[in-house]
Amino acid sequence: MGFLSTVLGFCGFGVGISAGLVIGYSFFIYFQPSDVKDPKIRPLVDQDSETLQKMLPEIPLWVKNPDYDRVDWINKFLEYLWPYLDKAICTTAKNIAKPIIDEQIPKYKIDAVEFETLTLGSLPPTFQGMKVYVTDEKELIMEPLIKWAGNPNVTVAVKAFGLKATVQVVDLQVFALPRITLKPLVPSFPCFASIFVSLMEKPHVDFGLKLIGADLMSIPGLYRFVQELIKDQVANMYLWPKTLQVQILDPAKAFKRPVGMLHVRVVRAMKLRKKDLLGASDPYVKLKLTEDKLSSMKTTVKHKNLNPEWNEEFDIFVKDPQTQALELRVFDWEQIGKHEKMGMNVIPLKELTPEEPKVMTLELLKNMDLNDTQNEKSRGQLVVELTYKPFKEDEIPKSFEESKTVQKAPENTPDGGGVLAVIVHEAQDVEGKHHTNPYVRVLFRGEEKKTKHVKKNRDPRWEEEFLFMIDEPPINEKLHVEVLSNSSRIGLLHSKESLGYIDINLSDVVNNKRINEKYHLIDSKNGRIQIELQWRTK
């Protein structure tokens, strides 16, 4: 009877299951609604508040917030490029992770940790919108909203004590709102020196974790614990104002900041050629460094003298002593007309020994072409004394944050004095009546500096720096900055015109060490100019 009961029981179970499936399927088909209608598509303004609340998280930021721009072109770009980015990112991740893993596994008595498979899947992240900030500093700030519901396959094998365990990460979802800052912007490719990344809010991270085929995230309580742990750890490291910095270029080299000071003493000239009708000349010397945008420095004019003595001293900031050279040109001053060149020569700075004065007697040449036979003619000699003094390491900024702070003045700065740095960034809405080829003229204590000319541009950008070494703080003085325009056409009646000017009180920069502001130009309808001032002391 026992055996018969068991057989009948199994039969009854099988019949019952089969009958239940047939009956259930029949009810499902019979009672399926036949009046299902196509969904109605209605504008957002016609939706009720409850429906809108449900839809709100899925609406892109560029729809909800006018500060965010639509960036579908980036999503399309990622879609086509993702198969190649996937391979490149995974290869880079393996190369970065391998030395870190090799360093850590001995501490936990693990034999090996290896990636069996590593792929980010076929679904790229999407940008739901991007916000861009504009500042007066040399930086670009972006805040993209990134959503990634991907299908990656990351399988890691851990070997220890002769056993092997396999962990697999699947179904990854990441929603994040990072702030990406590119700074400082520099005139060298890729045009920014560092990338700063910080999170504006805690990210949403969701994923599946399989161990030996079983989903660990299905264990009660483990899913929420792991998710909150990841959020807290990431937030502790990168939640704003904390940042992750990735350096791309050395800011000091990218900006070509001064690394030393060249002290030049123009002593005398001898046996100069006669240029005037009365058998004399009116010589003066212009000197400047190559690869430098600053205007030339000049000695005084020695009238009617073929053997003039100047004994005048100049200090020039050096950015690259290995490639820069000092150009010396002797001119004959003319009251009317163009000044005639009497001769020139060039001294490479790499020939100078730091901190050692060197007196040089230079033969004046017509040009620096060694094959030019006219250089064989005697044009006179020029005697100069040069001393190159490199700055100390602590006087040169190592990072962007240090470069935003004020540099120290060089050692040869007079006691109680300093260096006034004037950085001309850009101008906006400058326009002349007859032409708009703007350049900036900076005037301080009778010393004049000029930027390069920008042709036919109402919004020119210069990014040029001028340095004035002075013996006392300019507390009660002003800096005159004027935007001018020159016409290249010969014979034009209005060949030069002013596009606006500003006189800046220097007491603020002495007290604050650094100011960076946009000034409205006087005698200009809408013109503005951005000037950065620094007061550097020892």
Image (spheres, rainbow, N blue to C red):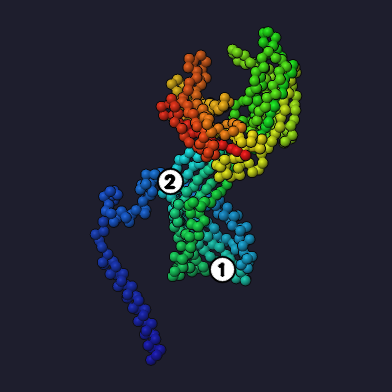
Q: Position of residue 93 (x, y in %)?
A: 57, 55
Give the crowd class for mark 1: few <14, some 14-19, many >=20 residues within 10 Å: few
Q: Is residue 513 left or right of residue 203?
A: right
Q: Position of residue 244 (x, y in %)?
A: 53, 51
Q: Quadrant of residue 94?
A: bottom right
Q: Position of residue 241 (x, y in %)?
A: 49, 51
- Which amino acid type is marked by label 2? Met
Query: Are circles 2 and 1 on residues that touch, CB within 8 Å?
Result: no
Name the image quarter holding the N terminus: bottom left
The first of marks 2 and 1 along the sequence is 2
Residue lying furthest left: 35
Name the image quarter holding the C terminus: top right
Q: Is residue 39 left or right of residue 239?
A: left
| Residue at horizontal 67 percent and vertical 8 percent from the top | 277
Give how far apart the Cα atoms at labels 2 and 1 are.
Answer: 42 Å
The residue pinned by badge 1 equals 165
Q: Position of residue 505 (x, y in %)?
A: 50, 32
Question: Does residue 189 lie above or below 58 as drawn?
Answer: above
Q: Secondary structure at mark 2?
A: strand
The residue pinned by badge 2 equals 130
Q: Nearer the viewer, mark 2 or mark 1?
A: 2
Residue lying furthest bottom: 1
- Which amino acid type is marked by label 1? Ala
| Residue at horizontal 59 percent and vertical 12 percent from the top | 336
Give the crowd class for mark 2: few <14, some 14-19, many >=20 residues within 10 Å: some
Question: Does residue 471 lie above or below 306 as drawn?
Answer: below
